[in-house]
Every structure is written in structure tokens, then in C-alpha cells.
Image (cartoon, rainbow, N blue to C red):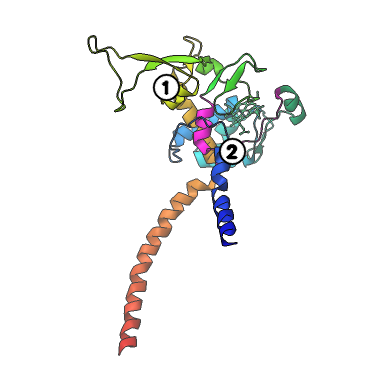
Amino acid sequence: MMKRTFFLGVCLFLLPAFAMAASSGYPLDHIEPDLNDKASLQRGAKAYMNYCLGCHSLKYQRYGRTAKDIGIPDNLMLKHLAFDPDIKIGDLMTSSILEENAKYWFGAPPPDLTLHSNLKGGPDWIYTYLRTFYEDEARPFGVNNLVFENVGMPHVLSGLQGRQIKPECMQLPQLASNGGQKRDVLTGDVLLEKKCGREITDAGHYPLQKVDNTGTMTTADYDAMIYDLANFMYYVGEPARIDRTRIGVYVLLFLAFFYIFTWLLGREYDKEFHR
Ligand code: HEC
């Protein structure tokens, strides 16, 4: 009986980990979101409104709250980041796409993304997902994704990032047993070997190849834009996070200050007690 309860306990404890690991298993790239970087949040909001809101609503978030939190004046928010002149600053950031249509077009309706950064792998997942679309003729929109296999979403940023292909096999440096790269003794050239499928990622290499001159952005600029987008989505997932860290500092300062008086009072009580 004890054993079974223990086993059940362990399973329940590990449940969130299983849920997180349920995606494709492609290793996620890690980013550190920074909610104090207002410029990044503003750029992320701009990218989101331009490229994502058309399909994905943020229906738990209002224009006004977003503008205030990320430091954009209300009038500029409405002028540049709201696409319908009828939108008021207090409105929710909904998308105008109809769910029935979207489901018919894409096979799956584009989900609301307000809370997405609290799910799956968080900002890391979003950051990796938007950088790992690759060409796959078997899919309706001609693209597939490394972290979300057989995804229904087209690669809407393809014009910026450029096309990426996933070669079955790649020529990669041979690794020595100490982890370094093997070199030719005479020429000093790095020795290459053919790696295929999962071996490519297992050896720590990015398994996609960019087709030259197909995107308007460099890889570094594109990655920076996706960082801003992921950062913005992290903010939207829990807007109170900005205030919470700021207020938290004051609370800790107050407690430290209060401790002095508590300690002095305690010392007075202590005197009475021992007499
Ligand atoms: C043309 C419509 C369209 C646009 C524009 C679009 N998406 Fe999507 N997106 C979809 C659809 C459809 C799905 C659902 C795919 C599925 O379930 O197979 C999806 C799925 C997603 C998911 C995964 C949701 C999940 O189930 O975990 C994320 C994250 C996402 N999109 C982010 C974005 C971001 C960020 C942008 C802006 C750069 C964007 N999308 C632009 C249609 C769109």
C-alpha cells in the first residue's frame, strides 16, 4: 500500500515535466526575457501587431494596459499599433479572423496567445518555434516545423527570415574523444564526417540550412526580432510581473527596516522575561 502511494506521488510530482516534454523533443534554445527592456517590449509589440494579431488574438489583454506597461502613449498606440480606427484604448486586443473560417483554412484554428508563454516551454519554446520552420512539400503550406511537427501555421515571417531546408545528411566536423574537433595531421584541416537525421542535433548542430538571398533580414537581426516577440509574449502572459518585481523590492526593504524595530522590541521583552 505504502509503495503504491509512493509511486502515485512520484507520478503526480513528475506530471508537469511529462506535459512539457510532450512536444517534438527538439532541444529548445534558451533566452532570458527582460521586462525592464522597454524598447525590446515595444519592438515585440509592433512585430506582434503586424504579423500575428491578424490570426492570433490576445483576448485577455487591453490596448490601454499594454500601452501603459510598455511605455507607449495612448494616442501613439492607437495610431500605429491598432489597425481599425474604431478601436478604443479600453478595448481587448482581439483578432478579426473568424474561427470557423480559420479552422477550414488551416486545419486548426489559430489559438489565442495571451497565455501561451506560460505553457509548453515558455519563451524558449516560442523563440525556437519561430526560428525552425523549414520547407516540406508534403505539408499544405509547404512548411513544417522542428518543435511543432506538422503544424498548421504557414511561415508568415518567411520573407524576413528566408527559406530554410532540412537536409537529410550534413558534413559535420569529426569529434575526438576529448570533445575537440579532429584535424588532419598534415594540413591542419578539420576532418568532416557525414551525419544524418537526429545525429545532427545530437552532435549539437542546427539541422537547418538557410537558402542564400531569400530573406530580407540577416540571421542575427531575425533572431533579435524573435527575441523581442518572445519577450513581449512573456510580458502579455502575466502583465503583473513587471509590478510584482518592483513592489517586491520595496516589500523586502520594508521588512529589513521593520526587523530592526522588532528586534529592539524583542530585546525589551527579553529583559522583563529573565528578571
Ligand atoms: C495566417 C494565420 C497565422 C498567422 C499570421 C500567425 N499564425 Fe501562429 N498559428 C496559426 C495556426 C493556424 C496555428 C495552429 C497550428 C496547429 O495547431 O497546427 C498557429 C499556431 C501558433 C503557435 C502554437 C500554438 C500552440 O498550439 O502551441 C504559436 C506559438 C504561434 N502560432 C505564434 C505565432 C506568432 C508569434 C505569430 C506572428 C509572428 C503567428 N503565430 C502568426 C496561424 C497563424
Q: Residue at x 31, y 27 (%)?
A: 179
Whether 205 is drawn above or below 260: the answer is above
Span shown in magenta:
106-131
For the image, the number of numbered tags is 2
Q: CA distance from mark 1 to mark 2?
A: 25 Å
Q: Helix, strand, or loop for circle 1?
A: helix
Res 261 quadrant in image: bottom left
Instruction: Decide whether residue 181 is among the magenta residues.
Output: no
Q: Pick whichever of labels 1 and 2 is earlier in the sequence.
A: 2
- Quadrant of the rendering where the C terminus is positioned: bottom left
Whether 155 is drawn above or below 227: the answer is above
User: What residue does disc 2 label?
Assistant: 116
Q: Quadrant of ligand 1?
A: top right
Q: Residue furthest right?
A: 100
Q: Residue at x 55, y 28 (%)?
A: 147
Image position of 228 (left or right of 152)? left
User: Can residue 156 be seen at all in this image of the molecule?
Assistant: no
Q: Residue at x 55, y 15 (%)?
A: 159
Residue density around tag 1, few if under 14, some if 14–19, many if 20 or more, within 10 Å: few
Q: Residue 4: which disc?
A: none
User: Can residue 252 be seen at all in this image of the molecule?
Assistant: yes
Question: Any atom of ligand 1 within 8 Å of the CB at mark 2?
Answer: yes
- Quadrant of the rendering where the N terminus is positioned: bottom right
Which kind of residue does numbered mark 2 sit on?
Answer: His
Which kind of residue does numbered mark 1 sit on?
Answer: Ala
Q: Residue 220: which disc?
A: 1
